Amino acid sequence: MGDIGHLHLRDRRGAIRTHPSRQREWHWWLLGGLMLMVALVILFRGFFSDALMPTTRSQALIEQAGQALAAGRLSATDGNGARELYEAAIAIDPDRPEARSGLARVGDAALAQARAAMEAGRFTQAHEALRLARELSVPRSETEAVADALRTRESSHAGIDALVERGEQARLAGRLVGDDEAALPLFARVLALQPSHADALRGREDAIGTLLDDAREGLRAGGVVKAADAIAIAMQYDPGHIDLPDTQARLTEELDALRRRAEADFTRGRIDVAVQAWRLLLQRDPADPDALAGLQRAAEAHAVRARRYAADFRFADADAALREASALAPDNDAVRTAVAQVERSRRAHRESGATMPAAERRQQVAELLRQALAAEQRGDLLAPPGDSAYDKMRAAQALAPDDPGVRQGVARLLPQARQCFDAGLSANDLGRARNCLDMRDALGEGEASVAQARRRLAQRWLAVGDERLAAGQLEGAGSALRSALALDPATPGIVEFRERLRSAALGRTN
């Protein structure tokens, strides 16, 4: 009785036997293991079938492809066409010749389907089958023979005479292009079916002639964009039309004249008119180098205006000029410099305390004049920013432009600004010369003297550009040209240098 609670008992012969509760537990473990094995087999059956037995899978696809081919189902978007099934078999086992030969049979069947559909007048299906045959690399001679026969058969069913009549009516009504029922598209449909159709050829020639006549008439009124569009349409339908060369030549002449007018307007200070011409050129050719360079020069001219307005504390006008400049060339160095200079002048004006009491103003002016003189004696004419003699004098000007001490200080600084400019030219430090020139302009030097200095500096930039061009440095030469144009676009020789630079750039491109 003492062994009843143990897991094992002895039978009548003294052998040990398992307790019934332990037997039931073992049965549950065995059943669970069997169920897990069944689940794993189901879960990984596809994996083992594809990964471990690719030959079997490939063979199955080949058999399915053969059935699809026999049923005439050559291609299907759901992947069950003969083509797709053979291609899947090749992807699994590229070395199976049966799959590749089967794919070739699909191409032959596609060509046969194209012939049958053509004979039955099902031209859309014929074209689809012919496209499949070409994609499957059926010999070109065979596909082209079917394509020629298809065009001939299709033309006999397409109502060629009716298409020509509709095209002629559209031509007489002036509807040359624009939709499928316009003259040129209708004639093109006819000629695609019968390339030598005399009436269609004649109608196309007359329609393009009218189109180019209108283009030449528009050119006389300055319609270069419409003329360029008309020429492009003519080139699309008949690049060998007899009127094309003359119309193209006239377009080239008008474009050259437009460039010359833009240059003349810019030189006369009619910047907005020049910009309109350059933008018109860019509508015709977004990469037109002259027009792109013109917009850069216009932006720089607006930047110069902005600096001048800021020098007179006309900040509303300066901001308007900067907006124009930024709209034309936001990344231009001259524009960014002008933005900084205008803000610098604005800050100096704001810090000058324009609303301060008169006594405090006089005291502040006197202090600024003292600081300007000290900076001048240290030789800090233009730098450091904010503490230079120029900056202090400008701040004093902002507070009291008519103060006698300010006038005397300006009169004392102007000769030094001129010396600074001349020294910059002598040392070929053209950047410093430009800063000194801006200083002369801001301090109120006479317009004639400033204009003369601008011309001198522009000529020096042209000389630098000439040296760079001779050395083959086209980018550096272009930068020098832009600097000269920003200073004085009417500088003698500037137009000729621009043409030389353009010719050199075209030569390098070719």
Image: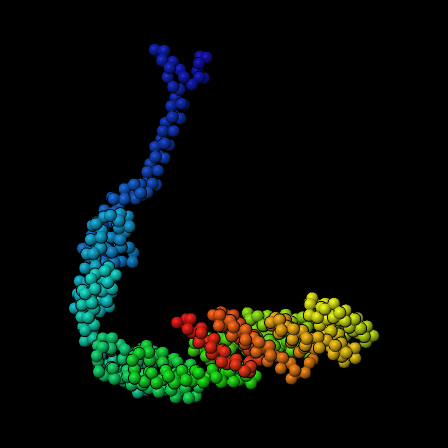
Q: Residue furthest front?
A: 426
Quarter of the image for residue 355 reads bottom right
Relative height, residue 382 to residue 216 (above, below):
above
Q: Where residue 204 appears, x then y in whole percent?
A: 28, 82
Q: Where residue 382 appears, x then y in whole percent?
A: 69, 70
Relative height, residue 16 to residue 136 (above, below):
above
Which sits in the foreground, 121 or 447? 447
Relative height, residue 209 to residue 348 (above, below):
below
Q: Is residue 102 left or right of residue 344?
A: left
Q: Where residue 184 appears, x then y in whole percent?
A: 30, 80
Relative height, residue 29 to residue 402 (above, below):
above
Residue drawn at (31%, 78%) of the image = 239
Residue drawn at (32%, 42%) of the image = 47
Q: Does residue 33 appear in the picture of this structure?
A: yes
Q: Does residue 170 appear in the picture of this structure?
A: no
Quarter of the image for residue 116 reads bottom left
Q: Is residue 351 left or right of residue 82?
A: right
Residue drawn at (51%, 71%) of the image = 468
